[in-house]
Image: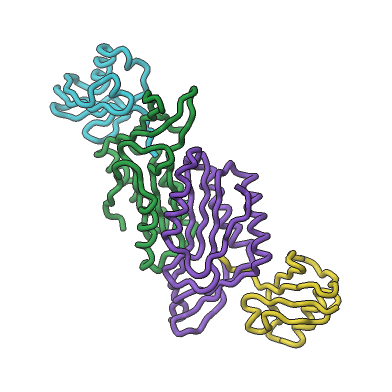
Chain colours: A yellow, B cyan, C green, D purple
Amino acid sequence: MKVKVLAFGALTEILDREFYAEAEDTATLWAKLRGAYPALTGRKLLVAVNSAVVTENVPLQENDVVALMPPYSGG
Amino acid sequence: MKVKVLAFGALTEILDREFYAEAEDTATLWAKLRGAYPALTGRKLLVAVNSAVVTENVPLQENDVVALMPPYSGG
Amino acid sequence: MKSEKKVWVEGAIAPQKVADSLASHASKTNIGAHAMFLGQIRADEIEGKTVRAIEYSAYRELADTGMTDIREAIFSKYELTCMHVYHSLGVVAAGEICLFVFTSAPHRKAAIEACEEVVERIKKELPIWGREIFDDDTHQWKVNT
Amino acid sequence: MKSEKKVWVEGAIAPQKVADSLASHASKTNIGAHAMFLGQIRADEIEGKTVRAIEYSAYRELADTGMTDIREAIFSKYELTCMHVYHSLGVVAAGEICLFVFTSAPHRKAAIEACEEVVERIKKELPIWGREIFDDDTHQWKVNT
């Protein structure tokens, strides 16, 4: 599946803010990115698919939007 | 002892805001006033002598200032 | 920081005072959090009559001492940078502000908790009385809950 | 009262916004208490460098949903009259305001508790990130405690 990936916060120093990737589920996507960018290893991460936070591995559909988010630090 | 009496809040509808009275202690003062102004009977009261709140009957000195105060309602 | 401050305001507290007080803290860059409380006069309906204003009076001498006690206790208890309190005397109309408590601290917990404690202590400990004036010009004395 | 509100402010929140927001509530004469929280950028010193600003970014779509959830939960839990929240995006300098939470209610307990809960939930639940910019133009990503 080709999905759109959005990166936020400190992750934007390693990844582009927005790019496309191929993956069947969110766990595979993150594993692939870690393989390509070793600096991602060990990072705390929140994942949202189509603007809803997911807490487990979820299968991806074509054109899904996957957000990769470090811990929040607003306020 | 001649003392200066200050009345506050709802008490000012019964007593003058400021007047002089003769009494040996705070309990006697209040009893005298109740005798003269029956509308005072049963009123909740805080008493201060020379700008310090007193919670028991205290003897009065000549020229003391006695404040008679209903429950506070600021804020 | 613990010095005497002017507490009493004749009539309503202007909303602009809140902005001005806040703006004056921009140079204190160790502050991370401000907490504010504002009391506003409610147009309560009581037995068919509506409160149109409250007239506040105080035993100033005792209230000033009480405010100093509160200030000192709050500064010993919380890690605060500043604290400002304004209370109206005289007539304040419904919809207007009669109390403004403003605490600032490096971190939010101290500012928030101090602000709330100051509000509670002011209501409980300061010799201030409110006379509720109704739309037909009758009145009754306010009772704090 | 529960309708969508504008939350995001480009750059710092002006102190005047606080006065204007407060003044606009004078006509709501069922309000008896306002609670406010303001976050201000601290010039923290970290390893000899001083924070001169924080640059905020957010995942807007998700943050808007989160803010709607918070608003609805707070209005169900507390007897509130209004609630306003403003959060900066972009660069906010040390000493400037980056967060403004404003709750109003007939009685103080609801206003104060709601305000504190909103602040905590915003920090915990909204996808916002702060990049601390030092005086030598290096930076680090803020971590909420």
Q: Is D25 positioned to the left or the right of D67 in the image?
A: left
- Which residue is drawn at the image coordinates 28% and 49% (left, top)? C6
Residue B73 in the image: above or below residue C67: above
Q: Looking at the picture, how far across and down is residue D100, in whole percent?
A: 50, 59
Residue D89: quadrant of the picture: bottom right
- Which residue is drawn at the image coordinates 84% and 72% (left, top)? A60
Q: Looking at the picture, how far across and down is residue B27, in whole percent?
A: 27, 20
Residue C124 appears in view = no
- Which residue is drawn at the image coordinates 49% and 78% (left, top)? D133
Q: Looking at the picture, how far across and down is residue D68, in whole percent?
A: 65, 56
Q: Looking at the picture, how far across and down is residue D117, in whole percent?
A: 58, 52
Residue D139 in the image: above or below residue C30: below
- Which residue is drawn at the image coordinates 44% and 63% (left, top)? D14
- Give the number of marks: 0
Q: Is C34 positioned to the left or the right of D72 in the image?
A: left
Q: Quadrant of the N terminus of chain C?
A: bottom left
In the foreground, B37 or D18: D18
Residue A63 in the image: above or below residue C26: below
Residue D5: quadrant of the picture: bottom right
Residue B64 appears in view = yes
Q: Is D117 positioned to the left or the right of B15 in the image?
A: right
